[in-house]
């Protein structure tokens, strides 16, 4: 990440930070780094809980009562709330494969599953325990995706679209894609 910032600053034609003061740059850099770190799945449960608590506490429903998100907050609380939502947006983008149209999603699933399986192959070679979803012998593409959509994507998007209802098409695509994989799994089970 540090190299990325060095590279951007080294070329004046591409330095998107050139108009910022030193303090503004520090804040921007800090926010970007936190957003990138928030894509780690270890933060998923925290972000999901954050969304659910905001929805519950503020009575957010299909985008209503969003004005309460920043009501009666001091500057530090506003900064923190903004950062949490930026983190959530980036995380949502990071896990968004199942929300894409089928032809795009399915191509990426092939790449992701092959990456997982190669990791599992390497772990077996090194006599290490095989990581979750990484055993090509026991894990199917359809089964893994149905589990991912049911266990991670749909619960998260249910909360996410309460706050951002105009993005409900993401949920619709995820449901369509899950159903497509259910059909594939049924066909596999017939063999």
Image (spheres, rainbow, N blue to C red):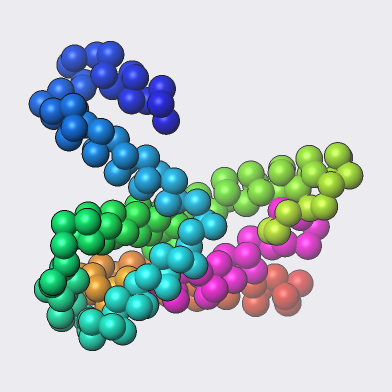
| Residue at left offset 52%, top offset 75% | 150
Left or right of 101? Residue 190 is right
Figure check: 14 above or below 91: above
Is 48 a magenta residue?
A: no
Q: 84 or 39: nearer the eye?
A: 84
Position of residue 140 measured from the top left corner of the image (x, y, whole percent): 69, 62
Quarter location, residue 27: top left
Position of residue 118 measured from the top left corner of the image (x, y, whole percent): 71, 43
Quadrant location, the C terminus: bottom right
Q: Please, what is the dominant secondary structure of the magenta stretch?
A: helix
Quarter location, residue 73: bottom left
Q: 176 or 147: nearer the eye?
A: 147
Figure check: 10 above or below 92: above
Q: 43 or 104: nearer the eye?
A: 43
Left or right of 65? Residue 104 is right
Q: Is residue 89 visible?
A: no
Position of residue 46 measured from the top left corner of the image (x, y, whole percent): 46, 66
| Residue at left offset 71%, top offset 48% | 117
Q: Is residue 35 visible?
A: yes
Q: How many marks?
A: 0
Furthest residue toward right: 127
Position of residue 172 measured from the top left corner of the image (x, y, whole percent): 35, 73
Quadrant location, the N terminus: top left
Q: Which residues are magenta?
A: 134-159
| Residue at left offset 48%, top offset 62% | 44
Is 147 a magenta residue?
A: yes
| Residue at left offset 13%, top offset 28% | 21
């Amino acid at each position: 990440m540090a190299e990325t910032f060095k590279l951007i600053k080294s070329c004046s034609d591409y330095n998107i930070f050139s108009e910022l003061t030193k303090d503004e740059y520090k804040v921007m850099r800090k926010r970007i780094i936190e957003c990138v770190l928030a894509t780690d799945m270890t933060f998923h449960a925290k972000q999901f809980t954050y969304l659910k608590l905001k929805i519950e506490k503020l009575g957010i429903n299909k985008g209503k009562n969003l004005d309460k998100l920043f009501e009666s907050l001091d500057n530090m609380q506003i900064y923190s709330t903004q950062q949490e939502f930026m983190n959530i947006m980036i995380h949502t983008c990071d896990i968004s494969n199942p929300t894409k149209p089928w032809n795009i999603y399915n191509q990426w699933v092939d790449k992701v599953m092959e990456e997982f399986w190669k990791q599992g192959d390497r772990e077996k070679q090194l006599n290490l325990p095989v990581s979750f979803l990484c055993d090509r012998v026991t894990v199917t593409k359809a089964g893994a995706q149905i589990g991912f959509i049911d266990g991670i994507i749909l619960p998260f998007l249910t909360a996410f679209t309460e706050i951002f209802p105009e993005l409900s098409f993401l949920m619709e695509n995820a449901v369509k894609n899950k159903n497509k994989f259910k059909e594939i799994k049924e066909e596999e089970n017939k063999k």
